[in-house]
Image: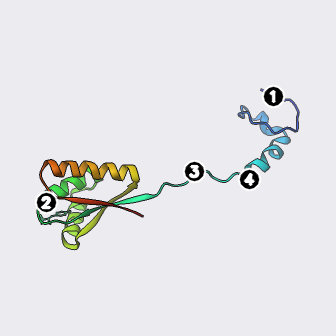
Amino acid sequence: MKREKSNEPYFNTVLSSEENDNENFDKNFSSLTLQEKPKLKKPPLYKVIMLNDDYTPMEFVVEMLQTYFSKSQEQATEIMLHIHQKGLGVCGLYTFEIAESKAAQVLDKARKNQHPLQIKLEKE
Ligand code: TYC
């Protein structure tokens, strides 16, 4: 599809390399292109932080870390022991909705098993 010769900027999809041969192609687009800023910003990330308590079984915490935070048995055990010893630990970093959803799923499982496990989200 060949365009009529014109100095007006145009906005049609480029359909063939013929369009690139047109000497007005760069001229028409350059000012538009240079003025445009990227409109997509990276979303903020949130840490899912698990808190220690005296009652939730270690095995349950390890299972949650494997199931909802994609940790290996070894990674999950390491994180669980860190929480047990230091009082809290980071399970993962996600956008708000994913972080909130993972926290809700873990807390739901914990409550169904009558464990007092606590989780908080913290903006990076
Ligand atoms: N402190 C618990 C125990 O000794 C284990 C535990 C680890 C609990 C991590 C919660 O987020 C937690 N059974």
Q: Which mark is residue 27?
A: none
Find the residue positioned furthest to the top: 1
The yes-or-no answer for disc 2 within 8 Å of ligand 1 is: yes
Q: Is residue 38 left or right of residue 116?
A: right
Q: Are marks 3 and 4 in contact (CB under 8 Å)?
A: no
Report the quarter where the C terminus lies.
bottom left
**Residue receiving disc 3:** 40
- Secondary element under disc 4, as helix, strand or loop, is helix
* Image spot of residue 97 (x, y percent): 39, 49
Separation of residues labelled 1 and 2 (CA atoms): 70 Å
Give left or right: position of 115 versus 19: left
Residue placed under numbered mark 4 in the picture: 35
Does label 3 or label 2 sit earlier along the sequence?
Answer: 3
Dot 3 or dot 4, earlier in sequence: 4
Tell me the kind of residue under disc 1: Lys
- Residue under label 1: 2
In this picture, residue 46 sits left or right of residue 69: right
At label 2, which amino acid type do we have? Thr
Cα separation between marks 1 and 4: 27 Å
**Viewer-nearest of labels 1 and 2?**
2
**Which mark's residue is nearer the viewer, 3 or 1?**
3
Q: Amino acid at mark 4?
A: Gln
Q: What residue sits 72% from the left and 34% below the top?
A: 14
Find residue 66 and report its horizontal and vertical position in percent: 24, 53
**Disc 2 target residue:** 56
Specify which label sits upstream in the sequence, 2 or 4. Answer: 4
88 shown above or below 44 = below
> x and y percent of residue 13 in the render?
70, 34
Asked where in the image residue 60 lies, by quadrant, the reply is: bottom left
Which amino acid, by three-letter code, is at mark 3?
Leu
